[in-house]
Every structure is written in C-alpha cells, then in structure tokens.
Image (cartoon, grey):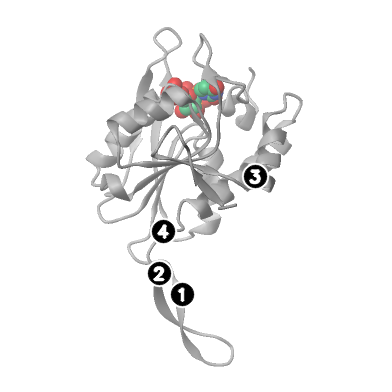
Amino acid sequence: MPLVAPHPGFPTARVLAHPVVADVLTRLREHHTPTAEFRRHMAVLAKALGLASTLDLEAATRPIRTPLEEMEAPALPQPAPAIVAVLRAGLALSDHLVDLMPDAVLGQVGLRRDPETLEAVSYLTALPNLAGRPVLVCDPMLATGGSLVRTLQEVVDHGAAAAAIRVLTVIAAPEGLARVAEAFPQVVVYTCAVDSRLDENAYIRPGLGDAGDRYFGTPH
Ligand code: PRP
Ligand code: URA
C-alpha cells in the first residue's frame, strides 16, 4: 500500500493511507478526547502530513564535519520552505512542522468564518516574500473551502508559484476539495481523510467538531 494515495474523485487530493495515521485520526475525532491528548494527536498527524507532502522536494547537500571526518551530507535545498498557518487552527499543524524543517520561514493568514454567511472574513495577513520557496499551507479542516481559497490567493499574491504550494489538512469535505481544485487546479491537497459531507452549518460530518476550539481548549 503506498503511503499517499490519490483520491479517486479528486485528482488534486492525496490521502495518507497508513494504519497508524488512521488510528490517530480516530482518537482525534472522538468526542471525549481531552485537550492535552487532542494536541498530541495533532502533532503526530502534522508530522505525517509534513513528511508526506515534502516527498517530492529536490535533494541537495551541504558540507558538514562529523566527529570523524568531513562529508557532503543530504540537506533540504535553499531557499527553505515556507510554512503558512491559517489562523487559528492552522497553528495546530504549523507548530509541529517546524520540528521537521527548522529553517522554514513562517507566515500567517488570519481568517474566521462569518456565522451568517459562512464565508471567510480576513483579519490578518502576515506573509514573507514566497517567491522560489516550496510553500506548505496548514489548516486542519477543509470545509466549504472559502478559507483556503482566500489564503491561497494571498499566498500567490506574495510570490508563490501555484505548483510549489501544497496544502496540509487533517479532514477534507468533498465540497471544499472541489472548490479549491476549481480555483487552484495546480495545488495538491494532502489530507488524512475525506469525509462524507457538510451539514447545514458547514461543519464536516462525521468530522471532529471545531478544530480550533478543541486544540486551543476554548469553549464550544
Ligand atoms: C475553521 C478551520 C478553517 C475553516 C474551514 O476555522 O480552521 O480555517 O474553519 O472552513 P471553510 O473551509 O468553510 O472556510 P474557524 O473559522 O473556526 O476559525 P478558527 O481556526 O479561528 O477556530
Ligand atoms: N471548521 C471546523 O473547525 N470544523 C468543521 O467541521 C468545519 C470548519
């Protein structure tokens, strides 16, 4: 079984096909999982998504000295990747990706869904120049896709090539995958699961509830 499988219905989606990932996601979804455990499970999934979504990065080397001799050692190419968190919940992934890519530059896009229109409303854009960098956009929930399409537009406006962008999400709804694929057909979305549908409040079903509230421990 490959680690990352294309989704039959969505050519731009890649689903992590690993029994350990699936088990951790089940624990994350469970209603009674306390905040501290929810954070730990998110950290595991963040690292799995981080590794899966960077398999295609070019190989480079840099000279180092081990305690015994000099060598030309494998390293990520320069410029280093950029990690962009969609606030708030994207921090649940990006916080853990920096362990994998310590030289990454970090950016944030602040969005919140308007409870009436369910569309994403922007409150912050803090992005470096992204030209020439692989860009990892992090948001654990892809529901209607409104937040992600807004974010991807900001990321492209800050110099990223669409083909260099990869999205990392824990659960995706079919509706969101379709919307993102239509707006940004070159952007690949890595996810741990594609769930069945959105409900009338645009929550993913079966989903995991409100990812931001569960990760930050805020009331829901
Ligand atoms: C959640 C989630 C995504 C967005 C997904 O954020 O983290 O950013 O909703 O929904 P969409 O695909 O329909 O746009 P939320 O608005 O709850 O804000 P938060 O991260 O600050 O909790
Ligand atoms: N945001 C969440 O946190 N959960 C959903 O199911 C949809 C949007």
The Cα–Cα distance between marks 3 and 4, rounded to whole angstroms, is 20 Å
The reply to whether the C-beta atoms of the residues labelled 3 and 1 are less than 8 Å apart is no
The Cα–Cα distance between marks 3 and 1, rounded to whole angstroms, is 27 Å
Quadrant of res 150: top left
Q: Which residue is depicted at the point 52% across and 49% down?
A: 4
Residue 167 percent across, percent down from the top left: 42, 41
Lateral position of residue 125 relative to residue 55, left or right: left
Which badge, 4 or 1, comes first in the chain's sequence? 4
Amino acid residing under circle 2? Ala
**Near-viewer residue (165 or 43):** 165
Amino acid residing under circle 4? Asp
Which badge, 3 or 1, comes first in the chain's sequence? 3
Amino acid residing under circle 1? Pro
Q: For mark 1, what is the residue?
A: 74
Residue farthest to the bottom? 69
Query: Which quadrant of the figure contains the C terminus?
Result: top right
Q: Nearer the viewer, mark 3 or mark 1?
A: 3
Q: Which residue is depicted at the point 56% across and 52% down?
A: 3
Amino acid residing under circle 3? Val
Element under disc 2: loop
Lateral position of residue 51 relative to residue 123, left or right: right
Q: For mark 3, what is the residue?
A: 21
The reply to whether the C-beta atoms of the residues labelled 3 and 2 are less than 8 Å apart is no
The Cα–Cα distance between marks 4 and 2, rounded to whole angstroms, is 9 Å
Q: For mark 2, what is the residue?
A: 59
The reply to whether the C-beta atoms of the residues labelled 1 and 2 are less than 8 Å apart is yes
Which badge, 3 or 2, comes first in the chain's sequence? 3
